[in-house]
Image (cartoon, rainbow, N blue to C red):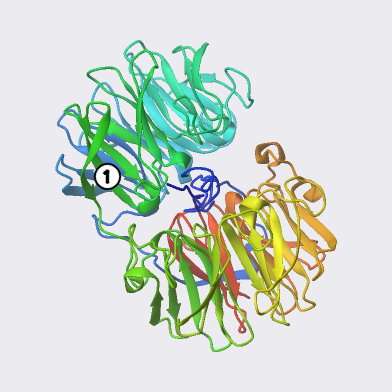
Amino acid sequence: MRSVQEPDIHGRQPSFAGTVHLMLKRAAVVVVLLLTLLAPTQAGAAYSFKGAFGSGVDPGNLFRTPVAMAKDENGFIYMVDMGNSRIVKMDAGGKVVKTIGSLGSSPGKFNMPFGIAVDREGNFLVADTGNYRIQKFDRNFNFLKSWGTKGDGPEEFGFPREIAVDKDNRYYVTDEFNHRIQRFSSEGTYEKTIGSYGRTDGKLALPQGIAINDQNEVYVADTYNNRIQVFSKDGAFKRKIGGTQGVGPYQFYHPRGLNFDARSGALYVADTYNNRIMKFDSSDRFLYTTGAFPTLAFPNQIISDGTGDLYVTDTGNNRLMVFKEVGLTVSFKMAIGDGRYGDKTYAGPFDVESDSKGNTFVSDSFNHRILKYDSTGKVTGKWGSLLGTGGPIAYGSLAGQFFVPRQMAVDKYDNVYVADSVNNRIQKFSNNGTFLAAYGSLGTLSGFFRLPSGIAVDSKGNIFVSDSENNRIQKFNSFFVYQKEWGRKGTGNGEFSQPMQLAIDSKDNVYVVDRINNRVQKFDNNGTFLAKWGTAGGSGNLDPLENWGEEPGDLFLPTGIAIDQNDKVYVTDTSNNRMNVYSDKGAFLEQFGSFGGEDGNFFSPQGLDIDSTGKITIADGLLHKLQFFKKR
């Protein structure tokens, strides 16, 4: 199967997260690393939050970006329901027993938690990520204590991700954005740091998962180095598994979750961007792999219940999958969690566009559909297979069906164009959803695409496509006759690394979000380079971690772009979790939003729209909602 980029769940999201791209090469969208990063709000008061679709707390059996899990001594499973800022307790049969916590910062409340563990005394530890702290509870989930704040010193966190407990009841926390592990005593006292940023043995790049075996060896998912590193309990490097990106038995693509089988000592790995789970024996020897997109979409964690059942957080599909091990493979047993496919319930929304009549269109990517709302917010259309009802199996390749739809565009006649990414084509519809035409297929020649993620239409009806995996922009006339193209992979002017969304200004200039290069590039209508901006002045770097900035005007793995009636350029700074605003020449003007689960903040903002009234609508890829803003 193919694979997609998540809305950067960090992610740097898939981008449910957004983020979409090794898909073609094998089986691995959005968006977004997951992945996803932090930044202070600047000039936020200039924009006011006006409401949301898909906000609020979900029922107990409806999950919103499930991530880590733990199991207590009585066999209950505790799953971190990150987007709902809570812990879900369920029995072995998948029945939800209770939910614990809610959005907030007081003791016992959470802000987008990611990690959970049970210590040797039966106490619970929660990585309360958005509050930059660890909270400790007794076995009945009564609050005991917390520690941590935002920062890069001891007992400070950049993004506390997951937690493991050693045989001596010490706690190890993956401090993702600080590229390190911090060890604490059972009382929460800081003891030592393991690792720092780098690519060599013993160094780390955005570590996420962590587990400790019976020999007190610390296994770390060194996520952006595509490997598992093994350390002693005191931090000495011992060995590694993997280290190259790929789909082989000792290769990974952004692995996240790790856990050991209590009986055999076998290691389970959630190989997230390859959309699979892997098993190794107690000597680190490969045993098997299973899973493919879209049956699994960016799995984040896997645990064994000790009887042969494996629980996997199928994060991109917002559910918990249970498999039964049978020899060196698994069979499907059940799925836990209701589907996120109501009229205002989304799964990885990637883009928003409005027409001249005040209608709004949403590409609900992991529901493989387009939703249409009138000016009152009423759903008036659902496009896609299964009559647009959505769900993990609602993808298709026939006319009018979608497989992870991405950016949309509306022409002067209010026709709607959709970048149907995994189907490697563009589809055109009338305003009421009647299929009109499809263009393109998989390939590298002119007029062919590999995971197209962006589309825009200029005032003359010319169509521009962000051919993301081919690292180029293609231009077609209004009849979709090929005109020209520009771009190749690189960091120079007119070169790209995973170009994403597109926008057109009043002069028909073309703006390209050059995602991995952490920048925006501007071209005239024929592809002549005009300007660039972003981190380090838009200089670009094929390794985004070497070009990561959080200062005003910087960008980190941006995704979406829109231009208002005054030619101001709005860019979703996806992994800094904010909205940046620039002049049409790239001068930074202001920003709003920051990392958080509260209204007005973001976790992996994706596409956006600015309608004729000035209302700004932003799709949040990992919190699965649309947020509305207005400039004061």
**In this rendering, would 225 be left or right of 502?**
left
Q: Position of residue 559 (x, y in %)?
A: 61, 57
Q: Position of residue 554 (x, y in %)?
A: 72, 51
The residue closer to the viewer here, 293 or 241, is 293
Look at the image and tell me in which quarter the C terminus lies: bottom right
Q: Position of residue 124 (x, y in %)?
A: 29, 32
Vertically, is 150 above or below 281? below
User: How many numbered callouts?
Assistant: 1
**Crowding near the residue tagged with mark 1, few <14, some 14–19, many ≥20 C-alpha atoms within 10 Å:** many
Vertically, is 550 above or below 630? above
Q: Position of residue 424 (x, y in %)?
A: 54, 59
Q: Is residue 101 visible?
A: no
Question: Which residue is depicted at the point 77% across and 75% down?
Answer: 508
**In this rendering, would 219 be left or right of 72?**
right
Q: Which residue is mark 1?
A: 321
The residue closer to the viewer here, 525 or 318, is 525
